[in-house]
Image: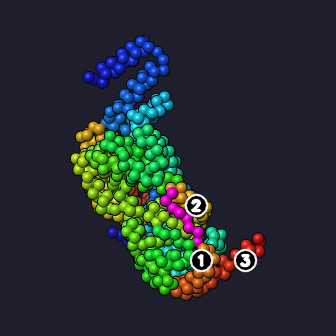
């Protein structure tokens, strides 16, 4: 082979490499996982978002949504970070809290009274939480909303002591949360979520924290019969993408992805609270759910103690402080307008 | 007696009766005769080898049934025909189309799903009307205590219970974002369980096939993969292995959520090995189940977690050279599973 021919082959190879490198950006296929089964609002929203990505990027970014078929949130998170077969996922703040305690701020019992308060705190904490996620190799595309957690119980819960008397479900693997409940006088029973239904049937657990939508869909309410009207906490989530996958997407397309993700967020923010209300109405209509009225003053007083007890241990102090300050400022501004 | 001879005899009787007398009762008798013929029309549709022909023929028949029901609103045979007909049409020619489009054209798929949901609900309402005629007050009782409401049901009700459960269950499965329907799952479960108690052999294992899907719900909802597997085995046994549906239901309901890729492929390949001509009464159902199985095998890489981080680059390069590379996600010929199948 002459030097000239070798040079030509070399140049051709370089040309192919350059073309390939350019075309690495030509199409990115995002595999997005969610534990929500198909035909739920979360799976639908994810699929709509993926379709918009494809349309608006002219096919440069496509997606495959695996709904309810790729394991638990924990396993999806692990896959995104280690095996990297999954590129993005809808994850709850509970799972993100295992990654970074800052996300536990959304789970402080009775810390929030309304979605408006949640919106303010999400805005205030967003940049901090994003930085924390980026440090773990994840990029947040949007916030998600899964409903507002209430206590569903086999006997009416009105006071804090009513709940302390019941065997309360907590998710297995979260020892810190379980011991926090125990230290504060509750009676937690740590179980795998798959054991929720049989444990309710046998009486191994007597109270569960659940959103009305999930309590109806999973039929847990039929085995509890009671729900306290005071909501415990919003179940916040986020769509996150592995940072290395995100980095492959050109900036202009990243912008499109974010815009469409925000539309999905807006839909969840608007529809999920409505669906929670409808689920409560349907469960009551069935005659199988009674709503017990919580002693609000007592719970609100306890709520402050819950927050203080969690701050520093389960939620970083600085995150808790920002959340509390933002929430309190919003409450004051509302009061001054009234 | 051949079908033609029977038809002539019916027509003669009809003519004689019309000539002999007149009035509403005659008209009603004639309508009843036609209604009975329609509601026991055998497996003309089910045994057809041409799904496209059936796709276009069924709507006409269904509208005819509905026209007759407008005149004979309490004809239980017609009600069951309408219920089963709308359920089957909704599944075979609307819902399944939606499923095959879901990964590539989601908006179109959703429009079809919405149409399928309305067809299932229409079917459900015909069945419930028939149940009400037989057990007055059962509609309200089902919402209060489904198992208790169905206790009086007898073996002759099994077909009605099955189709009520099938139509309602499909409607619920497409309505998980609608609390007014999503909470009806216990009613569906009770309908199928009661039918199973009364006659587990119904439809050559059709009840067990539905139970695969019912038991495939998440364990947190009371489902059980183990029980689903038992129903799958029963469905296969009762159909003597001639039905493709149980294999597809088990693969999608149990093996996919468990990410058991090899077993998933194995079961779908078994569905494809079934001879659609072996059981004429299952020809259409098997043809459609195999169509679904083929689609799932073609998209197996989308459904299961696989590949490595490098997969993204590889895909990008393949799309860069149209004609030079064949995308294994779009072209089954390139995937090892399909090669094995072929």
Mark yes or no: residue A308 visible: yes
State the mark number for residue B116: none
* Res A236 visible: no
3D distance between C-alphas at marks 2 and 1: 22 Å
Q: Earlier in the sequence, mark 2 or mark 1?
A: 2
Residue behind mark 1: A299
Which residue is label 2 attached to?
A277
Q: Is residue A280 above or below residue A84?
A: above
Within the magenta stretch, is there residue A290? Answer: yes
Q: What are the residue bounds of the magenta stretch?
A: A287-294
Query: Callout 1: helix, strand or loop?
Result: helix
Q: Is residue A329 magenta?
A: no
Q: In front of the other: label 2 or label 1?
A: 1
In this view, the residue in front, A159 or B233, is A159
Q: Chain of mark 3?
A: A
Going by the image, does A333 lie left or right of B308? right
Please tell me which of labels 1 and 3 falls first in the chain.
1
Q: Residue at x 56, y 82 (%)?
A: A306
Disc 2 chain ID: A
Q: Kindly report the secondary structure that dominates the magenta region of the rendered protein.
A: loop
Chain under numbered label 1:
A
Question: How much space separates mark 3 and mark 2, taking CA atoms?
Answer: 27 Å
Q: Disc 3 marks which residue?
A: A332
């Amino acid at each position: 082979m002459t030097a000239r021919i070798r040079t030509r082959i070399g140049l051709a190879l370089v040309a192919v490499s350059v073309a390939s490198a350019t075309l690495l950006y030509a199409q990115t296929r995002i595999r997005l996982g969610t534990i929500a089964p198909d035909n739920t609002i979360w799976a639908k929203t994810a699929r709509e978002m993926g379709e918009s990505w494809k349309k608006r990027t002219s096919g440069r970014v496509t997606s495959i949504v695996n709904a309810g078929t790729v394991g638990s949130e924990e396993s999806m998170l692990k896959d995104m970070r280690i095996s990297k077969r999954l590129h993005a996922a809808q994850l709850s703040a509970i799972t993100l809290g295992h990654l970074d305690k800052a996300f536990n701020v959304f789970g402080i019992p009775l810390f929030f009274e309304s979605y408006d308060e949640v919106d303010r705190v999400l805005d205030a904490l967003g940049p901090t939480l994003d930085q924390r996620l980026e440090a773990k190799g994840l990029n947040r595309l949007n916030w998600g909303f899964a409903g507002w957690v209430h206590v569903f119980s086999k006997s009416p819960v009105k006071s804090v002591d009513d709940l302390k008397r019941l065997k309360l479900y907590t998710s297995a693997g979260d020892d810190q949360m379980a011991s926090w409940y125990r230290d504060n006088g509750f009676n937690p029973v740590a179980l795998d979520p798959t054991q929720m239904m049989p444990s309710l049937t046998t009486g191994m657990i007597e109270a569960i924290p659940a959103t009305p939508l999930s309590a109806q869909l999973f039929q847990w309410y039929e085995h509890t019969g009671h729900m306290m009207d005071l909501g415990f906490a919003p179940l916040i989530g986020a769509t996150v993408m592995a940072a290395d996958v995100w980095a492959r997407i050109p900036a202009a397309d990243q912008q499109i992805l974010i815009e469409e993700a925000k539309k999905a967020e807006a839909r969840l923010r608007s529809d999920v609270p409505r669906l929670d209300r409808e689920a409560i109405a349907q469960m009551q209509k069935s005659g199988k759910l009674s709503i017990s009225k919580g002693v609000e003053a007592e719970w609100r007083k306890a709520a402050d103690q819950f927050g203080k007890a969690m701050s520093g241990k389960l939620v970083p102090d600085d995150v808790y402080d920002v959340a509390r300050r933002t929430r309190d400022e919003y409450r004051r501004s509302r009061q001054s307008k009234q | 007696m051949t079908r033609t001879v029977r038809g002539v005899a019916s027509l003669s009787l009809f003519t004689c009766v019309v000539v002999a007398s007149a009035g509403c009762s005659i008209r009603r008798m004639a309508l009843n005769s036609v209604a009975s013929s329609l509601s026991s029309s055998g497996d003309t549709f089910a045994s057809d080898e041409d799904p496209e022909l059936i796709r276009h023929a069924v709507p006409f028949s269904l509208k005819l049934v509905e026209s007759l029901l407008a005149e004979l609103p309490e004809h239980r045979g017609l009600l069951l025909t309408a219920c089963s007909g709308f359920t089957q049409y909704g599944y075979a020619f609307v819902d399944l189309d939606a499923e095959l489009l879901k990964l590539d054209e989601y908006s179109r798929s959703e429009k079809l799903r919405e149409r399928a949901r309305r067809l299932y609900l229409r079917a459900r309402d015909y069945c419930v009307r028939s149940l009400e005629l037989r057990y007055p007050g059962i509609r309200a009782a089902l919402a209060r205590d489904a198992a208790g409401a169905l206790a009086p049901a007898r073996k002759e009700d099994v077909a009605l219970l099955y189709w009520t459960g099938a139509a309602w269950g499909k409607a619920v499965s497409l309505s998980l974002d609608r609390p007014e329907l999503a909470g009806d799952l216990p009613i569906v479960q009770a309908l199928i369980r009661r039918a199973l108690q009364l006659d587990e052999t119904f439809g050559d294992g059709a009840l067990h096939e539905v139970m695969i899907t019912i038991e495939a719900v998440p364990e947190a909802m009371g489902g059980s993969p183990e029980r689903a597997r038992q129903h799958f085995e029963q469905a296969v046994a009762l159909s003597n292995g001639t039905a493709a549906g149980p294999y597809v239901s088990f693969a999608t309901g149990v093996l996919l959520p468990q990410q058991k890729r090899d077993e998933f492929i194995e079961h779908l390949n078994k569905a494809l090995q079934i001879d659609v001509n072996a059981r004429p009464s299952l020809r259409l159902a098997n043809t459609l189940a195999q169509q679904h199985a083929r689609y799932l095998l073609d998209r197996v890489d989308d459904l299961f977690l696989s590949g490595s981080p490098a997969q993204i680059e590889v895909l990008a390069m393949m799309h860069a050279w149209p004609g030079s590379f064949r995308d294994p996600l779009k072209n089954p010929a390139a995937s090892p599973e399909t090669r094995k199948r072929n």
